[in-house]
Image (cartoon, helix red, strand yellow):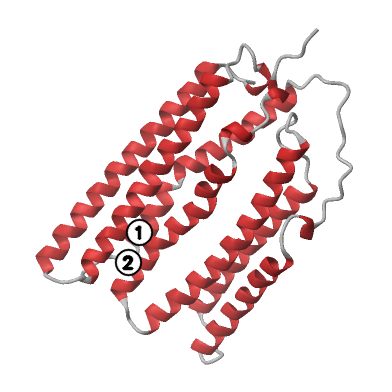
Amino acid sequence: MPNSVLFYLIFISQIWLLSYFYPRKILERIRFVIQNYPPQQYPKLYPQSLDKVERVQKIYKFLNYIILAIGIWLLVGLGMLSNADNQDNFNEGIPLMYGMVQFIPMMMLEVLGYKQFKLMKQKDTRTNRKAELQPRRLFAYVSPYLIISAVVMYIFLIAFELYMTQYTITFDFMVKVGSVSLANLLFIGITLFNLFGKKLDPYQATEERIKQTKFAIRSMAFISIFVSFFMVAQTLVNTYELGTVEIMINSLYFQVLAIFSIGRIIKNFKIEDIDFDVYKAESN
């Protein structure tokens, strides 16, 4: 199979997965919650009016449709460019830039979710609240081998980059190692927040928080390993001038990130397993 055909298949997968499949799954989950846990019976779940929730759904859906159309346009444009030049003449940065755009609607939902939890806290009028007495230690939520693997992969990345630059600190070395280091610092911050920070949802059951903390920490570790691996692969394809391989790796990069983040959330946090009783109206 020619590299160009293989890239088209991979890029089509990126367009479909991030701008159609996962957005559709997220909207289905939101609609399921609204239909089965309405504001009348579960008022604590809706600090804002249902109209605002439905408006956010429409905006999210519209943004993904626009981004989906952009992806199809890019795909057609790349195909025309390749046919005109009769060679694998691709811009390896296109999947990366497009992938960043594809994550914008999800980031919007994350920001709105934090605002939602803030409003829930403001409207929480309970005077008696249960405190969690369970110690929150890192290795109670994640295997030490997974954390060690992430650290080893990070050290390997630094050693590998130094070896490839003949132990010279180049600008490219600083960009790659610096970006991975910042990403790992972000992952550490998210881990510490999940371990020791106050829970965002004031009504969240203890069991749900434990499950969420395990998921978040494990996901951060897996993504850290993958980001280090991705940087190593980038260096190899750049060193050996494997341009058509690089563009495929760039496209696969965001798909793997989506699978380990959005995909695992959908798989591990099934709606029917969530305890919604905590959001019911208090009986007098």
Residue behind mark 2: 92
From the viewer's perspective, is residue 207 above or below residue 39? below
Q: 263 or 94: nearer the eye?
A: 263
Q: Amino acid at mark 2?
A: Glu
From the viewer's perspective, is residue 136 above or below residue 123? below
Residue behind mark 1: 95
Could you give the CA–CA distance between mark 1 and mark 2, rounded to whole angstroms? 7 Å
Residue under the image location 50 percent in, 32 percent down: 29
Residue 91, horizontal then vertical, whole percent = 28, 65
Residue 33, horizontal then vertical, whole percent = 55, 25
Report the number of discs. 2
Residue 25, image quadrant:
top left
Residue under the image location 73 percent in, 48 percent down: 194
Residue under the image location 49 percent in, 42 percent down: 106
Q: 13 or 200: nearer the eye?
A: 13
Locate residue 114 relative to residue 5 in the image: left or right: right
Whether tag 1 and tag 2 are in contact, CB under 8 A, the answer is yes
Determine the secondary structure under disc 2: loop
Q: Amino acid at mark 1?
A: Pro
Q: Residue furthest front?
A: 272
